[in-house]
Amino acid sequence: MNRPLAAAIAAALLVPVLAAAVERPRFDPHRLSQEVKTLSSDAFEGRGPATPGETKTVDYVIAQFKAAGLEPGGAVVDGKRTWTQPVPLGRFEIVGAPSFALTEHGKREPLTQGEQIAVRAAMDGSRKVDIQDAPLVFVGYGVEAPERHWDDFKGVDLKGKIGVVLVNDPDFETGHGDFGGKAMTYYGRWTYKYEEAARQGALGMLVVHETAPASYGWATVKNSNTNVQFDIVREKPAAAHPTLEGWIQRDLAVQMFKAAGLDFDALKKQAQTRAFKPVELKGVTFSAKYDVDSKVITSQNVVGRVEGSKRPDETVIYSAHWDHLGIGAPDAKGDRIYNGAVDNATGTAALIELGRAFAHAPRPERTVVFLNVTAEEKGLLGSEYYATHPLYPVAKTVADINLDALDPNGPARNFTISGNAKLGLLDRLIALAKTYGMSYAPDPHPEAGSFFRSDHFSFAKQGVPAISYESGDDLVKGGKAAGEAAAREYTRDHYHQPSDEWQASWTFAGMAHDLAMLYQLGDELANSGAWPEWSKDSEFRAVREKTADQRK
């Protein structure tokens, strides 16, 4: 198809169903495509933090921000704003080939990293890990939640022992109970389970992988956990991390339980009740031996802005992460570069183009910031650092609109957000979407815990109203059946895999359409005195209200 015709079709797709009060900007699908193609090319080496790929990415985004007409919005050096915010991170990598083994009643079985087991580099300060025949204890879902009268540990002594834990919440299988039914709470996230293991004094924690409750396959677990790991720099790292953090395949867990004379499925059902008590896997022990290269590095958040004309100290933030998994284990075709086209070259391209739109529009009353963060794939670290070391006060941050893994195909009749949070910011977006002929669809898979897996969560924890926008699944061409099938295929075949690569068939028409709506949302916030709030029953409302006097 020739470019003029493609542009005409794209423009037609951007025509709103109803007239809006303000002129709607148009976003160029071709420009979005080229930016995603560049960012996800092999030349950027998978955009891993603290690699040559980071240098190329940061330089590229800065160049694009400059060309778009943005001003530097980063840290102040010698009295001037720069384009970046330095982010100190701990970097941890297993050196050489690690050794893992199970011993079942005296019979030793070696385990292969990435196959039966996926162990992360130790982040508790250990330079050498040497665990010999540590007892294994099944601790259900690994939850201690006093407000829900729930305790999977029941006072068990885990010193010198490895916990074995199920992924997700106790409600996942039944869909009802004290943890929100199918919707995952933070207790269901694997990050929480490791944190709780450290609080319980465990030597380590192994999470049993099952595709449905994890919401992704083993390939994602392997690729995300067997490469270089990062963390924020902690004064007491052992307070947040046990020595051993890893995952095991379900089949291996079933084997371990059987060797101990236990029924995995029966104990799993018991773990879904308050009456559950920890169970030691008698006769089964775990061994691990490997060295850890540990150092502190500095990565970069990239920040551009359009300064407000009347209230520059009040800020609307658009965020997206630039990083992906870098170079890692080869796939079946031998490809080792994890290009991250959808995740998250799409969000970074969207950020650049939103910046261009604001830079070429009349200056807003409030400052609009375009924050491209590092190390999202390592645990939301870049956004966590920004939210706890803000360049612009969080008390006067109006909202965070996060962009992560947008659909590069055609437009949809609906949209969603990561998780099912209730807040005025979402109400505004829902009302605005109606003028674009779009409806809001609650997160179709709340059990995946998406609210805790994108950078907006870092802002929410500080009380800032925050959403992570997600493309809809009711496609104009093909309806929900096509949208859901495409989402399943991406998760199964491309998510956190080398095959997440730019495709010439992607039209970017849906992104271009949705960005006009997201621009209008930010523009309305930036040209008003409104302060969106969390719902009255939100766990983030109290944090926000502590700074209410600063927003008068």
Image (cartoon, grey):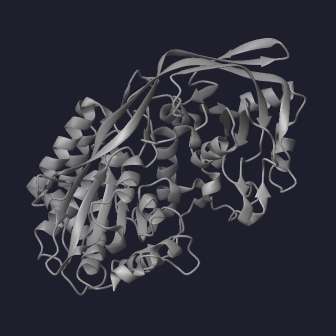
The image position of residue 551, as x and y in percent, is: 34, 81
Q: Residue at x 11, y 52 (%)?
A: 78
Res. 324 visible in picture: no
The image position of residue 77, as x and y in percent, is: 15, 51
Residue with the most extreme front position: 235
Up the image or down, 112 lies above or below 412; here it is above
Residue 428 placement: quadrant: bottom left
Residue with the most extreme right position: 261
The image position of residue 190, as x and y in percent, is: 60, 45
Up the image or down, 25 lies above or below 73; here it is below
Residue 304 placement: quadrant: bottom left
Residue 138 left/right relative to 217: right
Up the image or down, 233 lies above or below 302; here it is above
Please count the marks in the image: 0
Residue 446 left/right relative to 10: right
Res. 62 visible in picture: yes
Residue closer to the observer: 100 or 469: 100
Q: Residue at x 72, y 29 (%)?
A: 160
Up the image or down, 404 lies above or below 400; here it is above
Residue 168 left/right relative to 122: right
The image position of residue 34, as x and y in percent, is: 19, 47
> Is the C terminus in the top left, top right, bottom left or bottom right quadrant?
bottom left
Q: Residue at x 45, y 39 (%)?
A: 496
Residue 497 placement: quadrant: top left
Residue 92 left/right relative to 339: right
Residue with the most extreme top position: 107
